[in-house]
Image: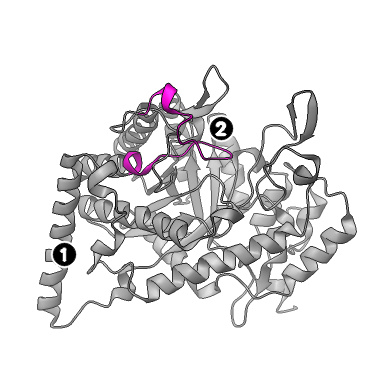
Amino acid sequence: MNPITSSLPESQTGDVWTPQTWKQKPLQQAVAYPDNGALEQATAHLSSLPPLVTSWEIERLRDQLAEAAEGRRFVLQGGDCAETFSECSPEYITNKLKILLQMSLVLTDGLKRPIVRVGRMAGQYAKPRSKAMESHGGKELPSYFGDLINSAAFTEESRRPDPRRMIDAYQHSAMTLNFIRALVDGGFADLHHPEYWDLGFLGKAGLVPERRAEYLRRVEALGNAIDVMEVIAGRKIDRVSLMEFYTSHEGLSLHYESALTRRVPRRPGYYDLACHLPWIGERTRQVEGAHVEFFRGIRNPIGVKLGPKATPRELMRLVSILDPDKEPGRLVLIGRFGAGKVRQVLPGLVAATAQTGRHPVWICDPMHANTVSTKSGKKTRHFDLVMEELLESIDIHEELGTSLGGVHFELTAENVTECLGGASGVSEKDLDQRYHSFCDPRLNYEQAMEIAFAIAHRMEAV
C-alpha cells in the first residue's frame, strides 16, 4: 500500500481526497472570476508561499479544544465581522487583542479554568452574502464579498472579483500574525502585566464605574493567585503558558484555502495552514457540497455553524463525514439559533451528536440569528436578545448534563454604535453616529465586556 495515499481520507465512493477534490462538488457562494487564467496564476503563487501558521500550533489547539469539550477549558472566539485591508494597522490590531485579553481575564477568574483565545482575525477577509448582486439607484453590481474577493465601493471596477486580492489577503494576514506574535513574544499578553491591555478610555468612555471596579478586582485576584503559585513552586510561572493566541476565519473561498493546504514533514495528511481554526458557514454546510468535501480532508480542528433549520438527522450525517474517526478536539459546533429558537433546536442536536459517540466543543454564537433591520434598512442586533440566547444556551447545557464549551462574537474594541442596548445605551437614533462595519453589526467595547461579566457571573454558579 502506498504510504502517502493510505493516510488520506476516502470519499463515500472510495475516491481519495486531495485539496482539489472539492472542485467536483456543488459550490455554494461561488464567485464568478472574469479571468480564469488570472485565477490560476494567483492560486499557483499562493501555493508557493510560506504557510501562515504551523502544524504544531494547530495540534496544540486540538489538544486544548479536546479539554474544552470536557469542560476543562473555555473558548473565547471573537473579532470583526469582516477584516479590511485598510485596518491592518498597529493600533487596530493591538486594540482587538486587548479586548480579547480583557474578556479572557474576566472569564478566567469567573470560570476558574483556562481560556482558549481564538481571534476572528489575520484572515477573516471573505463574507458570504444572501444575494450575489446588489442594486442602488437602478444600477446592479456584484455584492461585496469581503476584501479577499472585491472592494466595498459601489463601482463597477471595485466590485469586479479580482483573484490578485487573494495575494493581498495573504500579505495582510502575514503582517497581522507577525505583529501579534511580536506582541505575544514581548510579553504583551502576560498575566503578570494586565495593565498593558488598558484601552485608554477604560475609565472614561469605557466601562461604567461599577464594572471598572469589578474588572480591577478580578485583575487583583488573578495577580494574587499567580503570586501564590509562584511562591509554592519556588519559581516564576513561564508566561508562554499564559498567552497562547490562535486565529480563525470562515473558509469561504476554497481557492484560497486549498492553495494554502499542505503536507508537513513527519505528520500524516494535509493541514490548512491559512489559520488554526477554519469554519464552515451556515450557508455552505451541505453534506454533498464542496465545502464539506474540502473540510473533511484537512487535519485542522474545524468549526461548523448551525442555524435554526439544522436537524438532528442532518447533523448526525454531517459529523460522520467530518469526523469519521471520532477524534478529540476535531469538531467545534457553533450554534446560532436565535433567542426565541435555541430551546427548540439545541437539545435535539446535542442529544443526536452524543448518540454518535462524538464529543464536540459546543459554542454559542448569539449574534448572527439575532440580526434585524431598522426601518431605514440599517442592520443591527439587540443586546438583550444576544444576552438571552447566550444565557439560555448555558442553561440548556446544564440541564442536559453537558457543558457549553465557548462563545463566538463579532466585536470590536472601538466605541462603535452598531448594536442596540447594553449599559452604553445605544438607541436606534445613535446607529449612524459611529457605524463603521461594512457587513454585520459588532458589539462595542463596553457591550463586549458586559457580556464577559455576565458569563462569569452565570458560570460561577454552575
Where's residue 446, x and y in %? 32, 41
What amino acid is found at the position of numbered circle 1 in the picture?
Answer: Gly
Where's residue 403, x and y in %? 33, 45
In contact (CB < 8 Å): disc 1 and disc 2? no
Q: In the figure, is residue 71 to the left or right of 183?
A: left
The numbered dot on residue 66 is none
Q: In the figure, is residue 454 to the left or right of 280?
A: left
**Was residue 270 drawn as part of the magenta stretch in this picture?**
no
Indicate the secondary structure of the residue bearing disc 1: helix
Name the residue located 32 percent from the left edge and 38 percent from the top edge.
394
**Was residue 438 drawn as part of the magenta stretch in this picture?**
yes
Where's residue 198, x and y in %? 28, 57
Residue 40: quarter of image: bottom right
- Front residue (pair 190, 179): 179
- Front residue (pair 277, 149): 149
Tell me where the magenta segment starts and ends, as one range: 426-448
Mark 2, Cα crowd under 10 Å, few <14 / some 14-19 / many 20+, is some
What amino acid is found at the position of numbered circle 2 in the picture?
Answer: Thr
Residue 392 can be seen, yes or no: yes
Q: Nearer the viewer, mark 1 or mark 2?
A: 1
Q: Which residue is mark 1?
A: 223
Q: Which residue is mark 2?
A: 311
Name the N-terminal-most of marks 1 and 2: 1
Residue 428: quarter of image: top left
Q: CA distance from mark 1 to mark 2?
A: 45 Å
Quadrant occupied by the N terminus: bottom right
Name the residue located 68 percent from the left edge and 43 percent from the top edge.
145
Name the residue located 31 percent from the left edge and 33 percent from the top edge.
424
